[in-house]
Amino acid sequence: MRNTSNNALLIAAAVALLAVLAWGLEQAAVAPLQTGDVYPPFSSLRSDPLGAKALYESLAALPSVEVERLYKQRTVIGSRDTMLVLGVEPVSWSAIQNRTLEGYEKLVADGGRLVIAFLPVRTSRRMAEKRAVEERWNVKLRYADRKEEDDSAIPRETSLFFEAGPEWRAIASHNAVERAFGKGSIVLAADTFSLSNEGLREARDAAFMASLIGPSARVIFDENHFGVVESGSVTKLMRKYHLEGAVVILAIAAALFLWRSASSFLPPREAAARDTVAGRDSTEGMAALLHRGVAEKDLLDTCFAEWSASAPRRAARVEEELRRFKHDPVAAYRAASRALTEKT
């Protein structure tokens, strides 16, 4: 019964450890992916207030619009496509070189639409040197002096605004400008709070979002610039080759191994009572030695022979008594002892 109870405790402990391990893996790997906390702000994979998943799902619900995410390097945008590049840091973007600007122009050359929405900022930044974007596109990124008490979170209102040339036109009443490049167009948007999940919940502006996207049949959310790239993974290979069953079999095998390690398929053995071995003194040891080495009929003669060698003068008297009781060793021993006592 004791072994059975111990096995039950081991099985319960193994099950508890597996449950804790599964919970830890879910908290460390699955939960952040579900909420999108591992992705940068304005990513369409984030479902928290700083993400843009609500915009992605809202556009996907429209019957006339096809929505997808881009995890690879940008290619040429189709004539009826709009690519949304959200959450771009404005200070570092304004330092891009002419080669990057040429790449943007080639993207929309066939009639596509590129929307670059900048991350809201609050600090005032003044650039002394002239940037390539100012010379090539004739647009300047400027920052107004605006201070807020909380400097830790992303602000709702950005201090960024544009000083654009006549080639650019303003979009609606928001701080966004658009310019044609070839058959397509590029849009720069500074006020991007309304594109976030929180903005859609609190201050939804459908007209502004429609003017950004334009008359497109497909909207592409660029996740590649966030560093979210498509790569081979174990999960993808499992789904591709339908190895879900193999994972289930491995899980069952692991569970059986734990069960086998914690318990036995055979019934527990009953503990046999151990015989207590008592110690013996020298006399008992001598008796046991004689019992194994000397026959019972020769015991008396053997003892007499050994004794007579040490006391030859008294041997005749003892030998006489032994002959009288030759067939009774006990009586002979007693008669010999008595004869020795009388002599003494």
Image: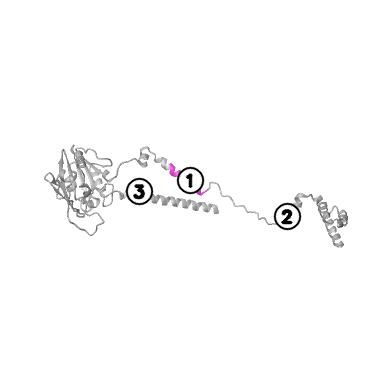
Pointer 3 with pointer 1, Cβ within 8 A: no
Residue labelled with disc 3: 30
The amino acid type found where label 2 is placed reads: Gly
Along the line of sight, the residue nearer the viewer: 75 or 80: 75
For residue 252, side relative to residue 64 (left or right): right
Position above or below: 134 against 279: above
The CA distance from mark 2 to mark 3 is 76 Å
Q: Residue at x 41, y 42 (%)?
A: 247
Residue labelled with disc 1: 257
Does label 2 or label 1 sit earlier along the sequence? Answer: 1
Residue 285 is labelled as 2
**Badge nearest the viewer, 2 or 1:** 2
The amino acid type found where label 3 is placed reads: Val
In the rendered image, the residue lying farthest to the left is 166
Q: Which residues are magenta?
A: 249-263
Residues packed near mark 1 inside 10 Å, few (<14), some (14 to 19) or many (20 plus) = few
Q: Residue at x 49, y 47 (%)?
A: 259
